[in-house]
Amino acid sequence: MLESGGEPQVSGGDYNSVHVGWWHRNDWGQHLQSRTWTLADEFMKYFGVKNCGSDHLDFSFTIQEGDFIALDFGKDGDWDHVGYVMVPGNGTGPGGYRDYHVAQHTQDYHADVSDKINGWETHDGKSNYGYVRR
């Protein structure tokens, strides 16, 4: 997805290096992923995160299709969870937020935020929301 969108991989580096850049590679038959690819905080900071604060209503009208979005559960500056906006919705969820379809690794699903399996809106006021720069 990232490569298809024109985001180049930076080759080289060590898995343990902070912000190493490469995402995955085949190294002598072994598939490796960098910290930038496997850790939410490293991923968001490497690609340039925009902190949107803790208001889910405002956040829902800020994001766009194709955005990588994140939650900072403790509001401590460390991004704890990442999702991908598949489709920003036209409808609204409880409280008036704009519904959106998000894909994420947790339970390997993609669903509208208003679906019970999701939960992005439940962090309103408790966590910070962010997205990768455009």
Image: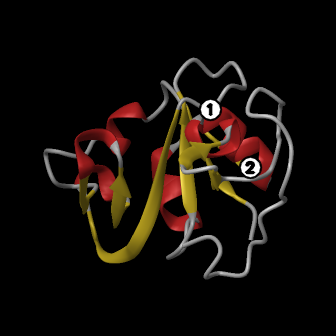
Front one among 133 and 121: 133
- Per the image, the residue denoted by label 2 is 49
Q: CA distance from mark 2 to mark 1?
A: 9 Å
Whether residue 49 is situated above or below residue 65 in the rendered picture: above
Q: Is residue 16 above or below residue 101?
A: above
Residue in front for this viewpoint, 5 or 123: 5
Identify whether 112 is placed above or below 83: below
The residue at 74%/51% (across/down) is 50
> Are circles 2 and 1 on residues that touch, CB within 8 Å?
yes
Screen quadrant of the N terminus: bottom right
Is there any visible trace of residue 79 in the rendered image?
yes
Q: Is residue 121 left or right of residue 51?
A: left
The amino acid on which the numbered mark 1 sits, given as a three-letter code, is Trp
Which amino acid does the dot numbered 2 rest on? Val
Residue 54 in view: no
Image point (74%, 72%), residue name: 7
Q: Residue furthest front?
A: 28
| Residue count near mark 1 (Cα–Cα under 10 Å), binned few <14, some 14–19, many ≥20 | many
| Sequence-first disc among 2 and 1 | 2
Q: Residue at x 51, y 66 (%)?
A: 61
Q: Nearer the viewer, residue 76 or 83?
A: 83
The C terminus sits in image quarter = bottom right
In the image: residue 130, left or right of residue 126? right
Q: Which residue is mark 1?
A: 79
Asked if 79 appears above or below 60 in the picture, the reply is above
Residue shown at the point (66%, 34%) measured from the top left: 41
Give coordinates of residue 75: x percent, y percent: 63, 22
Check disc 2 and report its element: helix, strand or loop: strand
